[in-house]
Amino acid sequence: MNEQVLYWIWLSTRPRLGAKGLRGLLESFGQPDALFAADVAALERAGVAPTLCKALLDKNLGPARSILQACEQLGITVLTLASEAYPAAMRQTADAPAVLYCRGSLPGSGMQPWIGLVGARQADERGLALAWRFGAEIAACGGVVVTGMAKGVDAAAARGALEQSCPVVGVLGGGVDVVYPRENAALFQQVAAHGCLLSEYPPGTTPNARHFPARNRIISALSDGIAVIQAAESSGALITARWATEQGRDVFSVPGPAGDALSRGCNQLLRDGAILAESGLDVMREYLYRYPGAVKLQGSRIMDQGSGACSGAHRCATEQASPQGAERKDTAVGAHSVRQPAAASLAPAARPLPTDLTPEQTAIVAALQDGPMQLDALIDKTGLPAARVLSQLTLLQIKKILRQLPGKLYERSGG
């Protein structure tokens, strides 16, 4: 058992000791073990308040030892301010947590842009589609997506990034072994397997409302920039944006329709000077020269509304399937790969449809019952507006009902 880590955990669990106060104590005493050894006279000379003195004079290491043993049993890594692996960007903030608990593998910080994607828990279909697209595009361009792992925008953004086989960093308001909300259990497992879950709270900690504003400061501190995708006037995502401003991070906001309650927070951010972003490309373009070689825009396979099509000035040539129809092919994008769907000739048998599809989704799926179809033909056949078809295609891909093929073709997914 690492004794130095034990003292860090002991210090981080002192009641009435915030992150800024902890940094002040470390400036006075150097290391947690020295603070652990300090008597009341030493604490008083350092100007420690009486109520905090009482907590620091509790020299019982039992609870800290139990936390460390639980981490070892659960495969959770403990990162302290003294750890080399502690995220450098966060270490430089005044309120950085003394200890981070990590489940999974933390991507190397400072090598590529980290972008926090936040927004409404009760996002509508437009917000979910945008979040998925932003996550996919940022990941495909070489960024790391940071999310709070809540339902709504957070979860959709994480799924978009994972679809590109790229790591996601999920920051939690409880222990990294506690799934919240429960419906995101599978997503938690995927993020831990392909990225990591982070928390300043020990294993077993149940999330509560007081934890989430503190969690938001970590999302911001880890990130080069924060993108708010959909947010009402009182959204918690705006707290993250405020943290980002205080910490000197970039703030991006996605504009929404006038009068839309779920867009008022985003539109207010734009009035306050946030950077307007309509896609993940808009975000990543800001980091093209800050991270030379890491960010790839030209030639990247960027998804348009989650459809797998390249967009705008960054449209790339669609790869042709081989005559033999290779089942999968990957196109390199920086340090990552964007998944190339299987050729149409290998279309698997369609699986049964869920019962909760909307009429528009049902119409799109029905149009594909005879085989793959081009996007334009699909729009013509359904008679739906192009924007509605694109947003519904994104949601159907999230549900794994449809998939996109080379050349803007769509087909039913297999079982």
Image: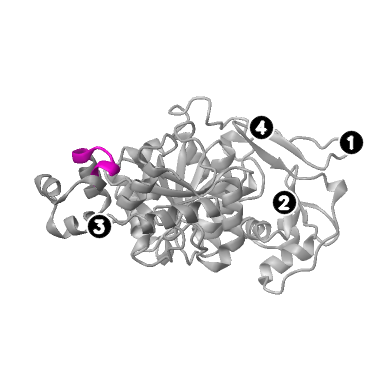
SS assignment at label 1 = loop
In the image, 246 versus 196, the foreground residue is 196
* Image position, residue 389 (x, y; %): 65, 58
Q: Is residue 135 left or right of residue 30?
A: right
Residue depicted at 58% across the width and 63% down the height: 185
Where's residue 263, x and y in %?
A: 41, 60
| In this view, the mark in front (1 or 2) | 1
Question: Residue 267: in sight, yes or no?
Answer: no
User: Can residue 84 be seen in this snapshot?
Assistant: yes
Whether residue 120 sits left or right of residue 344 in the image: it is: left
Q: Report how far apart the C-alphas of labels 2 and 3 lie in the structure.
A: 66 Å
Region in magenta: 27-35
In the image, is residue 343 part of the stretch drawn in magenta? no
Question: What residue would you read off at disc 2?
Answer: 375
Is residue 151 left or right of 215 when viewed as pictured? right
Q: Is residue 134 above or below residue 365?
A: above
Residue occupied by mark 4: 332
Q: CA distance from mark 1 to mark 3?
A: 72 Å
Q: Secondary structure at mark 2?
A: helix
Q: Residue at x 22, y 54 (%)?
A: 56
Between 50 and 122, the one lying in front of the other is 50
Circle 1 is placed at which residue position? 323
SS at badge 3: loop
